Each structure stands twice: as C-alpha cells, then as structure tokens.
Image (cartoon, grey):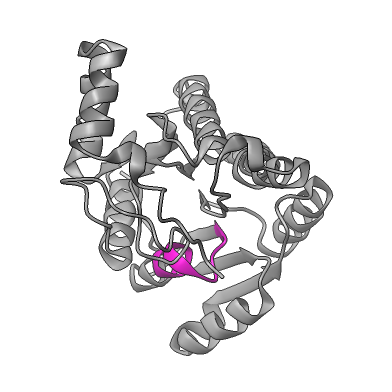
C-alpha cells in the first residue's frame, strides 16, 4: 500500500486540470514535497497562489516534456535538489482533434512527443533512482481512448494505446521488485476543458475533475494496477473481447454514439 505521507511527489502538467487537483490532494495527504512540472508559467503562478497554505512544500519547474533534453536536465536538477522522487504521476498531455488526413506533420509529432515519448523519458529519468532505493510508484494517465478506436482522435488514441502498452510492460518488468508499483489510469472524457465541445457517449457522462482526481489518489494508495472510469470503461475490455468487430462497432458507434463524440469537439482555446 502506497502512502503520500512524507513522500516526494512529482506531477507533470501539475499546474492545471487534474494535475493541479491531484497535487492538492497529495498535499492534503501530508506529502512532504510536491514537485510540479508544467510548461505554462501563468498556470504555475496561479497554482502557487491557490496553494499558498502549502507553499513551503511546493517546488515548481517550467518543463516542456516534448523536449527530451529539458526532461533530462530538469530531472537532474530535481534529483540534485530533492534527492529522490517517491511517486511520479505522468499527467501532462495534449489532444489534436479532426480527421487524420487533416493533421499536419507538426501536430502529429508534437502530440506523440508529449503524450507518449515525454511520459517514457520522464519515467526513465527517475526509474534508476527508484530501483536503487527499492521503492517507488509510477502513475501513467492514459485514456479510455487507448482501449478503443474513435474517429476524430486517431493520433491521440494512438498515443494513449502506446502509453497503455508501455505502462503494462513496465509493470511486468518491475514486478520482481515488490516495492515499485505501476498504475495505469484510463478515464473517459474529463470536464477540464481539454476536450471542450465533445458529445459524451450514451451512459458515459463527462467525469468530474475533482472526483476523478480523488479516485486516482485512492488508486495509488491501494496500489491498483488499473483505474478505469466510468463504469462503461470498466467493461470495455470485456465487450471488445467477446463481440465480433462489426458488432462492437455497431454497439459503440450506433447505439452508444462513441464514434460521434468528437463531431462537436472544439478543444481548449
């Protein structure tokens, strides 16, 4: 069972959205240090102001995780200043909506660098320290999109499929060391603004950011392997396993309107 008390927590994309909310929860659970990586300086300033009661325990770094050099340089600085990270939450991410044929080379490369490669490189920078200390917890925020295809978000879905496959492989590699845990989080749409304008599928409402953040913290405490929310996402692997592809497409696309959820997507401005 993982605990936040007296631990060093690092959250990428930690100055906004569920990253900020998870950090706040970690502080409420007596984390010794909250280390925030974020690219947005305004969000960093606002988060510090909002968490002023915990200011002595918060340490912020401006980091663009699409740039491996920044990741490794910032990680070296973190380890020099704080010695170790106990719980790493790979939360930073972005989305590009629309048909694949309309995506630019830059859109594709940037999304993959942030969502997939950034997560891998960030983990790699801190993993050796965790292995040497014989303890640690790695949390990878993936997506329900990593479990099923969805028109209008092909590159995003591809990046999250990659995160899930890599995260599960990493878990298996680290199982020989019982003190290093890996949790993969696979939520549906969250009401943070990242997916502004989406039409939630039938029986799959927008997730409340506060509620899902608390559930992620609880999943970390319980060393859960997966967290899938809401209920329809929990049964998704079962449905895909038993239904022929065309029937699954009919159920997901026609009955539950999953395949039309991005038709009204606007995204965060």
Residue 169 or 194: which is nearer the viewer?
Answer: 194
* Quadrant of the rendering where the C terminus is positioned: bottom right
- Residue at 22%, 54% (x, y): give it: 205
Res. 181 image quadrant: top left
Residue 259, magenta (yes or no): no
Above or below, comparing residue 100 to residue 14 in the picture = above
Q: Which residues are magenta?
A: 11-23
Q: Is residue 15 left or right of residue 120?
A: left
Side of 154 where 206 appears, left or right: left
Identify the residue at horizontal 54%, vertical 41% (top origin): 156
Q: Residue drawn 76% across and 59% down?
A: 80
Query: For the image shown, how many numbered marks are present on the structure?
Result: 0
Say which of 159 and 164 sits in front. Answer: 159
Q: Is residue 35 visible?
A: yes
Q: Is residue 224 left or right of residue 66?
A: left
To which quarter of the image does residue 182 belong? top left
Where residue 223 sits: x, y (%)? 32, 40
x and y percentages locating residue 150 in the rendered image: 42, 35
| Vertical arrangement, residue 105 with respect to residue 6, above or below | above
Given residues 85 and 20, the one toward you in this image is 20
């Amino acid at each position: 069972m993982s605990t936040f008390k007296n631990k060093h927590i690092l959250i990428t994309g930690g100055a906004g959205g569920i990253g900020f909310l998870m950090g706040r929860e970690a502080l409420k659970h007596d984390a010794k240090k909250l280390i925030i990586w974020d690219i947005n300086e305004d969000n960093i300033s606002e988060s510090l102001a909002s968490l002023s009661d915990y200011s002595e325990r918060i340490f912020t770094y401006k980091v663009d995780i699409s740039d491996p050099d920044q990741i490794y340089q910032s990680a070296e600085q973190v380890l020099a200043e704080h010695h170790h990270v106990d719980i790493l939450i790979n939360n930073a991410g972005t989305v590009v909506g629309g048909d694949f044929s309309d995506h630019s080379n830059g859109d594709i490369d940037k999304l993959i660098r942030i969502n997939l490669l950034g997560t891998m490189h960030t983990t790699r920078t801190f993993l050796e320290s965790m292995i040497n200390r014989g303890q640690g917890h790695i949390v990878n925020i993936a997506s329900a999109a990593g479990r099923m295809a969805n028109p209008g978000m092909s590159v995003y879905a591809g990046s999250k499929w990659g995160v899930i496959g890599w995260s599960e492989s990493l878990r298996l590699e680290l199982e020989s060391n019982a003190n290093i845990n890996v949790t993969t989080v696979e939520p549906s749409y969250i009401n943070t603004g990242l997916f502004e304008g989406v039409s939630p599928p039938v029986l799959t409402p927008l997730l409340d950011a506060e509620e899902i953040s608390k559930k992620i913290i609880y999943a970390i405490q319980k060393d859960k392997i997966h967290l899938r929310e809401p209920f329809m996402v929990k049964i998704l692997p079962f449905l895909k396993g038993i239904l022929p592809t065309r029937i699954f497409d009919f159920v997901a696309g026609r009955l539950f309107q999953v395949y039309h959820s991005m038709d009204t997507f606007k995204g965060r401005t």
